[in-house]
Structures are given as structure tokens and as C-alpha cells.
């Protein structure tokens, strides 16, 4: 009887084929989502990112979308050898009277085109179409509708697996839930790799697991740091 109870206590449901297949499916969906977001979407960036890319000659063409004079304009450019499209929004006007509290849009009184030319004379500035951008937004990325649906389905699938799947490794359900909710894609990838679905580096029986409170703090700092340095 004692041996039976010990066997049940050490039995790991993640070893079952059905859960391995679920984990593999979600990992495949996550990889497909990331690839499609990069190749078909537009990543949110900042005006400072654009200035840095132009200064290092990583960008040779910038699309200008908007009217001349005062107002909001959008700047689009491509990096990573033409693979990743990015965009930044700039408010052209009197930056002394503009209240930018809670607004990530850069405000300047100078024409962005002249600023870019002053940094790199060889950069080409063209007029971009006002339409033709991906129709949906996911994590501030502009993506086509089907890609947004795939991303949401992947996120929801990971959440349901955390709630209804086998007992996760290394952290409690609450802990992995906070990681997914606060750290977004990073939390989802961490769960698939380290939480049991893909069976990577299985922990020893009886290992201590991260609880919800500590996971909340850790995920919050990861989330804040990622948003500050890279963005979604």
C-alpha cells in the first residue's frame, strides 16, 4: 500500500503521450505566430530607434505617412535585411505646449524628414501609403487578422493548459498564470519549456516550486524590463 501511494506521488502526467502532443502543438503554434508576426507584421518602435538606425546606416529608406506641417505623422522603416518592418508615430508641433503625460508619441517642433537628412544624407525619404497596413493589433504589433487570431488562440491554449493540465513543474499554477498574464509571450514560452509541456530538463521529485506571490513580483519585473528595453 505504501509503495502504491509513493508511486502515485512521484508519477508525472507530463510523461503521457497526450500531454506531450498538446505541448508540441502549442509550441508549434507559438513558433508559427512569432514567424508570421515578424514577416507580415509591423513592430512598434520609437523615433529614437529610427534615428539610431539611420545614424548607423542600417536603414536606407524611410516612409513618411501624413500631411506636411503640424500634426501627427507616421514613419516606417525596415531592419534585419528587409525582414522586420517597424513604425513610429511622431507629433509635429510646439512641444512646449503639448501635454505628453501617458502618451508614448514623440513630440518635436522640427520636421522629422529634415532631422533624418541631417543625420544621414544618403537616406531616402519617400511618401508611404496611408492604407495598406495590417488590420489588427496584438501586443501593439500590427498584424493581419488571421495572425492575430492565431496569436490569441495560442495564448488562450497555454492559459487553458496551465489551468487544466497536469501539475506544472518548478512553479504553481498561480505562478505560471501570473507569468503568462504579466510577462506575455515570454511567460508562455517559459511555461512550455520549463513548466512540463515539452519536458525540458525534468526536475527531481519533491523539488520546491515558485509560488504565486513571488512569481507575481518576478513576472512584473520581467514585464516592465522588457517593455522598457524592447517593447511588444
Image (cartoon, grey):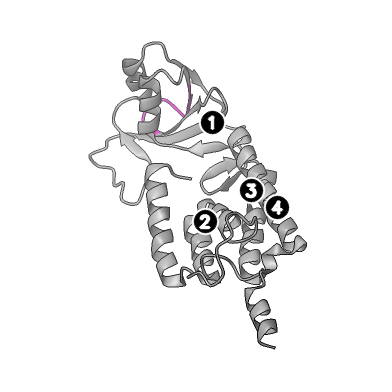
- SS at badge 3: helix
Q: Position of residue 197 (x, y in %)?
A: 65, 59
In the image, what residue occupies the spot 28% across and 30% down?
A: 109
Q: Position of residue 48 (x, y in %)?
A: 35, 32
Which of discs 3 and 4 lies nearer the camera? The answer is 4
- SS at badge 1: strand
- SS at badge 4: helix
In the image, what residue occupies the spot 51% across and 46% down?
A: 140
Asked if 225 appears above or below 120 in the picture, the reply is below
Gap in angstroms between the C-alphas marked 3 and 4? 10 Å
User: Residue beneath label 3, please?
Assistant: 30
Gap in angstroms between the C-alphas marked 3 and 1? 20 Å
Q: Position of residue 108 (x, y in %)?
A: 30, 33
Q: Quadrant of the N terminus?
A: bottom right
Asked if 166 appears above or below 221 in the picture, the reply is below
Gap in angstroms between the C-alphas marked 2 and 1? 24 Å
Q: Residue furthest top?
A: 122
Gap in angstroms between the C-alphas marked 2 and 3? 12 Å
Q: Magenta segment: does it hold 151?
A: no
2 or 4: tag closer to the N-terminus: 4
Gap in angstroms between the C-alphas marked 1 and 4? 29 Å
Q: Magenta residues, as a range?
A: 62-71
In the image, what residue occupies the spot 68% across and 56% down?
A: 23
Q: Are marks 2 and 3 in contact (CB under 8 Å)?
A: no
Q: Residue furthest left?
A: 96
User: Residue beneath label 1, please?
Assistant: 85
User: Residue beneath label 2, please?
Assistant: 187
1 or 4: tag closer to the N-terminus: 4
What label sits on residue 24 in the rendered view? 4
Between 75 and 14, the residue placed more toward the observer is 14
Asked if 172 appears above or below 33 in the picture, the reply is below
Amino acid at each position: 500500500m505504501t509503495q502504491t501511494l509513493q508511486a502515485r506521488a512521484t508519477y508525472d502526467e507530463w510523461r503521457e503521450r497526450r500531454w506531450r502532443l498538446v505541448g508540441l502543438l502549442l509550441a508549434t503554434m507559438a513558433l508559427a505566430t512569432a514567424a508570421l508576426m515578424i514577416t507580415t507584421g509591423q513592430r512598434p518602435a520609437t523615433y529614437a530607434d529610427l534615428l539610431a538606425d539611420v545614424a548607423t546606416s542600417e536603414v536606407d529608406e524611410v516612409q513618411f505617412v501624413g500631411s506636411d506641417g503640424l500634426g501627427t505623422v507616421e514613419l516606417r522603416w525596415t531592419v534585419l535585411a528587409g525582414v522586420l518592418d517597424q513604425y513610429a508615430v511622431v507629433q509635429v508641433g510646439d512641444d512646449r505646449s503639448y501635454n505628453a503625460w501617458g502618451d508614448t508619441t514623440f513630440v518635436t517642433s522640427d520636421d522629422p524628414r529634415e532631422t533624418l537628412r541631417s543625420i544621414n544624407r544618403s537616406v531616402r525619404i519617400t511618401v508611404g501609403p496611408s492604407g495598406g497596413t495590417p488590420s489588427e493589433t496584438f501586443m501593439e504589433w500590427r498584424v493581419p487578422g488571421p495572425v492575430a487570431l492565431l496569436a490569441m488562440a495560442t495564448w488562450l491554449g497555454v492559459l487553458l493548459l496551465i489551468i487544466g493540465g497536469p501539475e506544472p513543474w518548478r512553479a504553481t499554477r498561480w505562478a505560471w498564470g501570473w507569468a503568462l498574464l504579466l510577462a506575455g509571450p515570454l511567460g508562455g514560452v517559459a511555461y512550455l519549456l520549463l513548466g512540463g509541456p515539452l519536458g525540458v530538463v525534468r526536475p527531481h521529485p519533491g523539488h520546491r516550486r515558485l509560488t504565486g506571490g513571488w512569481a507575481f513580483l518576478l513576472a512584473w519585473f520581467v514585464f516592465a524590463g522588457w517593455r522598457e528595453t524592447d517593447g511588444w
